[in-house]
Each structure stands twice: as structure tokens, then as C-alpha cells.
Image (cartoon, grey):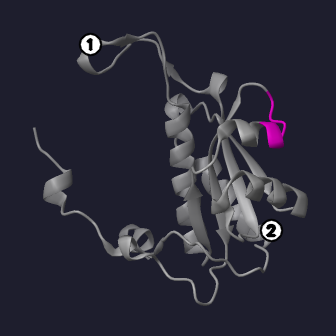
Amino acid sequence: MDFNELARLRWSVRDYDPRPVEQEKLDYILEAARLAPTGANRQPQRIYVLRSEEALAKVRAATRMAYNAPLVLMLCAEVGAAWHNQRETVMHGTVEDVYSVAEMDVSIVCDHMQLAATELGLGTLWVRGYDTQVLFDAFELPEGIMPICLLDVGYPAADAQPSKMHFESKPLEELVFEL
């Protein structure tokens, strides 16, 4: 299958079948995460696999967006391990001492994981609807580890469907500009 077809097949699943994700499929998804590009190849991603009843209860207490996925991956960044641009000038001339790419790196990793899961016939949902401190405390994360997003993973329920918004994309003329 070509890449654009794979990208079209991926949609945000909000209802999952209860069957667990097989270990070999999880391993494939985690390998996609390892292969994802990161700034200066620093690989600051730290991925926590949440599939025990206790871990899933904690994540479901932190967000309504875990739905009933049998597997949730908590994608974090070890912020100190990420590449930092030491000379960043942001919009309107404001100078920042340091710009970290940690969040971008983990977002790229998440995207690779979603596409790998789609290739395997699994559904995913990228989640950012939670309070970071709640997750940090619930899972007693080490200092310097920042939750960036959650990724629900599982088999879509038999009656699960993409939202209507999935089929809406702006035309390229509104998104791409040549200078």
C-alpha cells in the first residue's frame, strides 16, 4: 500500500473492541517509534505501556478520552535529552535563550506509531485532553519526564466509524504557499 493510502486509512477511533493487542503488534509499533526521526537523533521519547487494569484505571481517571482502549501508550519526553536550539529568535524579534524540540520529537514518534498501528489493522486515537500534572502524579514519573500525549490503541469496535470531520480536508491552495 502506498503512503497516502495508509494515511487515508488512519482515523481517530473512539470505540474499541475489548480484545487485547498482541505483543508482536505492540513490538512492531514500538519499533516504529524507535525509528522515528528526532532532533539531532537525541531520541528523547520515553514510552510507557499502559495495559494493566491498574494503569488503565489511572489513565481513565485522568482523561475521558482513553475510552475503552485495551492499550494506552503514554508518550513522554525526557526534556533534558532533547535537542535545544541555543539561538532561537521567535516571531516579532523576541529572543528565547533556548528552544526545545522535545514536544515535536514525541509528536513525530506518535505519528509513526499511529501509521504502524493502522498498517496492522489497529485503530488509534491521539489524546491531549488531560492535565499533565495529574498524569505525572498518578504514574509517579521521574523528574524531567513530561507527558506529551496519550495514544489509545486497539481493534476498533464493530460499529466504530470515523467522525464526519475525518473526510474533510482543506484544498492545498489554502495550505501551501510558494515564496
- Relative to residue 121, is residue 10 drawn left or right? left
Front residue of this view, candidates 107 and 40? 107
**Which numbered disc flags the more N-terminal residue, 2 or 1?**
2
Q: Secondary structure at mark 1?
A: helix
Q: Quadrant of the N terminus?
A: bottom left
Q: Residue at x 48, y 71 (%)?
A: 11
Q: Identify the residue position indicated by label 1 in the image.
A: 93
Label 2 vs label 1: CA separation?
49 Å
Q: Residue furthest left?
A: 179
- Relative to residue 175, is residue 110 drawn left or right? right
Query: What number is the disc on residue 78?
Result: none
| 50 shown above or below 164 | above
Front residue of this view, candidates 163 and 98? 163
Secondary structure, magenta segment, majority class: loop
Figure quadrant of residue 4: bottom left
Q: Position of residue 138 (x, y in %)?
A: 82, 43
Front residue of this view, candidates 63 and 83? 63
Circle count: 2
Q: Position of residue 151 (x, y in %)?
A: 63, 57
Residue 17 inside the magenta-drawn segment: no
Q: Residues within 10 Å of mark 1 (few under 14, many from 20)?
A: few
Q: Is residue 36 visible?
A: no
Read off the magenta span: 137-142
Q: Residue at x 32, y 19 (%)?
A: 90
Residue 139 inside the magenta-drawn segment: yes
| 146 shown above or below 16 | above
Q: Of the residues shown, which amino acid type is indicated by label 1?
A: Gly
Q: Of the residues shown, which amino acid type is indicated by label 2?
A: Gln
Figure quadrant of residue 20: bottom right
Q: Is residue 106 visible?
A: yes
Q: Identify the residue position indicated by label 2 in the image.
A: 23
Q: Residue furthest bottom?
A: 158
